[in-house]
Amino acid sequence: MGTQEKLEFVRQAYEAMARADIPWMSEHTSPDVVFTQGGRFPTAGTYRGRDAMFGHFMEFMTLVGGQFSIEAKDLLASEDHVAAVISVTIGLDGRQLTFDEVHVWRLEDGLLAEMNAVPFDPYEIDEFFASAKEPSATS
């Protein structure tokens, strides 16, 4: 996969994320993917495997009540990686936050193999989520 193909893959992936196209993402993600979300907010951490990564996404969407949008602003590809500057907007408890984040993708055999998500200002996001309520335990 050359740099242009990698850039197109990542563009299509962000379009799929924006429309919540989980089947597209699943088809284009390695079963052994490693996803790391930087920060200290409730869903930050490292997720290993497709099920864990999509579980993280669902947990995050639940946390923000589905109030989520994503836009790729800048993409840069090398032989080994694609870096993306993205803008994310989320909502919580009647509040809204728009922030920028860098995603570093590693593609392998035409699939997402690894992604690291690093917010520009993790403290801003931590503060936003500080008021998030823990989900109630179900009996």
Image (cartoon, rainbow, N blue to C red):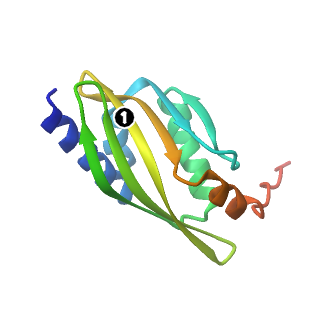
Q: Nearer the viewer, residue 99 or 27?
A: 99
Could you say which is closer to the camera, residue 137 or residue 60? 60
Q: Is residue 59 left or right of residue 107?
A: right
Which of the pair 125/9 is nearer the observer? Answer: 125
Q: Position of residue 48 (x, y in %)?
A: 54, 26
Indicate the secondary structure of the residue bearing disc 1: strand
Quarter of the image for residue 110 reads top left
Q: Amino acid at mark 1?
A: Trp
> From the viewer's perspective, is residue 137 above or below residue 5?
below
- In the rendered view, would you say 74 is above or below 111? below
Local crowd at mark 1 within 10 Å, few (<14), some, or many (≥20)?
many
Q: Residue at x 63, y 36 (%)?
A: 45
Judge left or right: residue 50 versus residue 113: right
Q: Residue at x 58, y 42 (%)?
A: 56
Quarter in which the N terminus is drawn: top left
- Residue 129 in picture, x, y percent from top left: 70, 60
Residue 11 screen position, x and y as percent: 25, 49
Nearer-the-camera pick, 65 or 37:
37
Q: Is residue 123 above or below residue 111?
A: below
Give x and y (percent) for residue 26: 37, 37
Q: How many marks?
A: 1
Q: Is residue 101 visible?
A: yes
Q: Is residue 20 visible in this depiction of the protein? A: no
Q: Which residue is mark 1?
A: 105
Query: Which residue occupies 51% across, 44% down?
Result: 118
Q: Residue at x 62, y 51 (%)?
A: 122
Which residue in the rendered view is the most extreme toward the right? 139
